[in-house]
């Protein structure tokens, strides 16, 4: 239907097996997927479809009438199997390269107007390889997929286990939103590792006093997306003394995660660090003149390396403002995060908040 190298294919589906089929279809064709959350307001979906100009949208029959058509060809995976089954079952020669687009994920900026971050295959695969090497899957591991496709954490949730043949449990939204149902789902499926925002971790820790007895198999807990407090980290170790807590830092513009820190049960100081860079990643703390700051002095966080996105879709002005020339490596680019940080004496980085007045809901 015209989706190929560097071409965008939209996907608007509930979390399901068919959703994964849709993602793989777009990627196998060589294209990049554009996730549209069915729960988004119609005005936001209309803007994203118009801005991305996707020619094909993979969806479900029940959602079709709620989506603005606008010349987009729709494929309903749950009602068009007879038509789909007539196509070839052979893997297509996609011709995709590491520097091609893998996805365009729309994220709200400080103005609230969505902007599409163009993620590359190499950024996602670099993040995968670091995780596979540093925290390798063991026999009989089980992962879970519970994050909306509109958030970049879903890329690891889906493809990190899938590319290693690891079992994944798909958890629907109604269970994710109820901590007791979520915990029951994790327990009954013997999930061994999870990625979640600290606010969800707090809700889960408050659901049961002896959470470790409800989730004896869940050993690895990865937090990202927002700052985790010292108090919450301490509560985690009190409730889950056998659990491994890993704090990741990053954003859509850097393929989700670029630093990591194993949060121990000991003294954390005033803040939980975001740690050190992952493989093939450079992290700079710079002042207003793009000069490195000393240990203990706050500076803006800049990111370089293989995880960088290509920029913002149809936003050349914003791309040039945020993706700038690396002052220390000729021909290289770094991402200006707008986040503040400082080095601790042990070399780990502490996150100190935003330079602007960003609000997260």
Image (cartoon, rainbow, N blue to C red):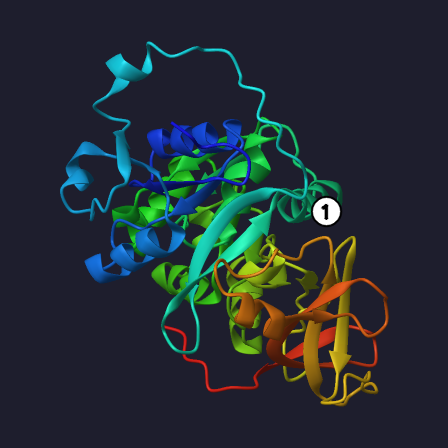
Quadrant of the image occupied by residue 21: top left
Q: Residues within 10 Å of mark 1 (few under 14, many from 20)?
A: some
Count of labels in the image: 1
Observer able to see residue 267 = no
Observer able to see residue 48 = yes
Q: Where residue 355 appears, x then y in whole percent?
A: 57, 86
Q: Is residue 4 above or below residue 36?
A: above
Q: Is residue 189 above or below residue 241?
A: above
Going 20% across and 46% down the picture, which residue do you hit? 67
Going 57% across and 71% down the picture, which residue do you hit? 234
Q: Is residue 106 left or right of residue 60?
A: right
Q: Where residue 228 appears, x then y in whole percent?
A: 54, 71
The residue lying toward the viewer, choosing from 238 and 222, is 222
The residue lying toward the viewer, choosing from 133 and 37, is 37
Quadrant of the image occupied by residue 57: top left
Q: Where residue 61 appears, x then y in whole percent?
A: 18, 33
Going 51% across and 64% down the picture, which residue do you hit? 225
Q: Is residue 72 left or right of residue 271?
A: left
Q: Is residue 299 above or below residue 25?
A: below
Name the quadrant of the N terminus: top left
Q: Is residue 52 left or right of residue 93?
A: left
Label 1 sits on residue: 130
């Amino acid at each position: 239907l015209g989706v190929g190298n560097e071409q965008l294919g939209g996907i608007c589906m509930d979390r399901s097996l068919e959703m994964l089929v849709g993602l793989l279809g777009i990627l196998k064709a060589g294209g990049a997927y554009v996730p549209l959350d069915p729960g988004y307001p119609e005005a936001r979906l209309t803007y994203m479809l118009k801005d991305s100009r996707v020619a094909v949208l993979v969806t479900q029959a029940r959602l079709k009438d709620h989506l603005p058509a606008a010349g987009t060809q729709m494929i309903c995976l749950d009602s068009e199997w007879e038509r789909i089954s007539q196509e070839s079952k052979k893997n297509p020669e996609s011709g995709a390269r590491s520097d091609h687009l893998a996805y365009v994920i729309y994220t709200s900026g400080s103005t609230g107007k969505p902007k599409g971050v163009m993620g590359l295959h190499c950024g996602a695969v670099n993040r995968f390889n670091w995780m596979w090497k540093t925290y390798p899957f063991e026999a009989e591991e089980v992962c879970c997929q519970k994050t909306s496709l509109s958030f970049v954490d879903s890329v690891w949730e889906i493809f990190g286990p899938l590319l290693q043949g690891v079992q994944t449990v798909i958890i629907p939204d109604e269970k994710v939103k109820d901590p007791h149902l979520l915990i029951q789902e994790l327990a009954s499926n013997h999930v061994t590792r999870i990625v979640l925002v600290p606010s969800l971790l707090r809700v889960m820790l408050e659901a049961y006093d002896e959470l470790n007895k409800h989730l004896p198999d869940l050993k690895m807990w990865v937090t990202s997306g927002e700052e985790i407090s010292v108090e919450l980290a301490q509560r985690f170790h009190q409730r889950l003394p056998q659990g491994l807590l890993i704090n990741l830092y990053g954003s859509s513009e850097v393929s989700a995660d670029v630093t990591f820190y194993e949060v121990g049960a000991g003294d954390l100081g005033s803040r939980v660090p975001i740690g050190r860079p992952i493989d093939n990643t450079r992290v700079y703390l710079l002042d207003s003149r793009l000069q490195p700051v000393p240990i203990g002095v706050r500076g803006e966080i800049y990111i370089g390396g293989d995880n960088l996105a290509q920029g913002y879709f149809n936003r050349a002005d914003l791309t040039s403002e945020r993706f700038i020339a690396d002052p220390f490596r000729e021909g290289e680019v770094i991402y200006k995060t707008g986040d503040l940080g400082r080095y601790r004496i042990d070399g780990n980085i502490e996150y100190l908040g935003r330079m602007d007045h960003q609000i997260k809901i």
